[in-house]
Image (cartoon, rainbow, N blue to C red):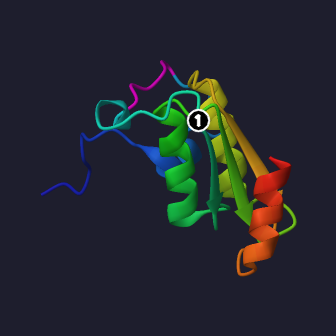
Amino acid sequence: MSSESNAPLIGVVAALAARGTQPAQPTTPAMFQQFSLTDRVALITGASGGHGLEAALAFLEVGARAVYCVDLPSEPSEAWSAGKEYAAATGLKGRLEYVQGDVTGQKVIWGIAQDI
């Protein structure tokens, strides 16, 4: 039995696999049939990687105008940078932005949201 799957790559896995290449064709947003965030702005904490970054990419797929990814590191992760490049290369219209912030401080997050 083969461990390979015919299922398309999605999210961060697709972004990392496409790094340094030009995607052959824009992906069909998988989440668009489920819900829409057209022209909305989102702030996601803990979004330098993992589930937060997956959510950020999904928000772009469903039409968010901008998604601000807030996390503790001063610089975004390699996965985040790959996600931003992938989103642009596949034609997603929204912006993925990185903001450094201590997500454990509610007032810090409120301040970042106010600045956005």
Compared across the picture, whether 24 is left or right of 67 comes to left
Residue 100 visible in the snapshot: no
Q: Is residue 37 above or below residue 74?
A: above
Q: Which quadrant does the N terminus fall into?
A: bottom left
Q: Residue type at mark 1: give it.
A: Arg
Residue 26 belongs to magenta span: yes
- Viewer-proximal residue, 3 or 72? 72
Q: Label 1: state its secondary structure.
A: loop
Q: Which residues are magenta?
A: 24-29
Q: Is residue 115 above or below residue 33?
A: below
**Residue located farthest toward the left when viewing the structure as drawn:** 1
- Viewer-proximal residue, 106 or 8? 106
Label 1 neighbour load within 10 Å: few <14, some 14-19, many 20+: some
Q: Which residue is mark 1?
A: 40
The quarter of the picture where residue 108 lies is bottom right
Residue 105 visible in the snapshot: yes
Residue 102's x, y, as percent? Answer: 79, 75
Compared across the picture, whether 64 is left or right of 88 comes to left
| Number of marks in picture | 1
Residue shown at the point (54%, 44%) measured from the top left: 57
- Viewer-proximal residue, 91 or 36? 36
Residue shown at the point (58%, 35%) measured from the top left: 40
Residue 97 belongs to magenta span: no
The quarter of the picture where residue 50 lies is bottom right
Residue shown at the point (41%, 33%) measured from the top left: 36
Residue shown at the point (42%, 43%) measured from the top left: 10
The quarter of the picture where residue 67 lies is top right
Predominant SS along the magenta part: loop
Residue 49's x, y, as percent? Answer: 61, 62
